Image (cartoon, rainbow, N blue to C red):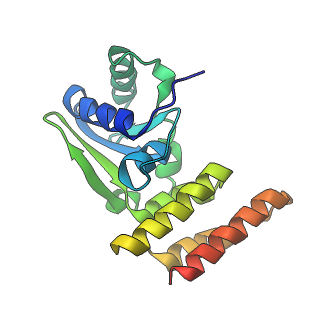
Amino acid sequence: MEPVLDRAAVAALVDAAGRALTGEWLLVGGAAAAVWFDASRRTEDVDLIGLAGTAEERIALMDFAVAAGLSPEVVNSAADYFVRRIPGWREAIEVLHRGPNATIYRPSPTLFLLLKIGRLSEKDLADCVELIAFARETGARIDLARVVTALAALPATTDTALSNRRLHLADNLRAAR
């Protein structure tokens, strides 16, 4: 089993990535939640993608993981597939950390939610609910109409648990208005 990374461990990896990697990178998923809005969040992997989308970036990311004493599987660049499918994603990222060699971004609240709703596992729902509460407390902007529209456009499901999670998220989004 891979190590469980807490906020401090993810923050240390982000800082190290800013020194060891070059270019622009996007941190998403549970790791982004941990360092951004949920101090108690833990994750087994760090979803970090190179914005250029090159094979060289993926290799550099794996080399970085090994140099940091982690297995290459701990740093995951597969999220780029999901990020790049969202129209306007590049305009929906915000600087998280500027290192001497690399800038690490995180998604905007809207992009974070759009990335989570497709799968909407229990952890995804918890992340979404926590982010909505964080946005309410801090005044961070969520394009609620866009997220509600995307949620409504998801294919129907016969999975009762998933359907209930979608309804729970929709209720939270309505309450955020």
Picture residue at 67% right of the left edge, 52% below the top? 122
Answer left or right for 105 relative to 144: left
Q: Residue furthest bottom?
A: 177
- The one nearer the camera, 3 or 58, is 3
60 w.r.t. 23: above or below: above
Q: Is residue 165 above or below residue 78?
A: below
Q: Point out residue 157 in the picture as x, y percentages from the top left corner.
A: 81, 61
Q: How many marks?
A: 0
Q: Work out whether residue 132 can be spotted.
A: yes
* Res. 153 visible in picture: no
Is 145 situated left or right of 63 in this image? right
Residue at x-position 64% and y-position 74%: 170
The residue nearer to you, when weighing 52 against 23, is: 23
Snapshot quadrant of residue 97: top left
Q: Tell me if 146 is positioned left or right of 106 in this view.
A: right
Q: Residue furthest front?
A: 40
- The quarter of the rendered structure image containing the N terminus is top right
Image coordinates of residue 142 in percent, x first then y, are 43, 73
**Residue found at the far left of this picture:** 100
Position of residue 137 measured from the top left corner of the image (x, y, whole percent) = 39, 72
Question: Measured from the top left, where is residue 149 in percent x and y?
Answer: 59, 75
Q: Residue at x 40, y 39 (%)?
A: 49
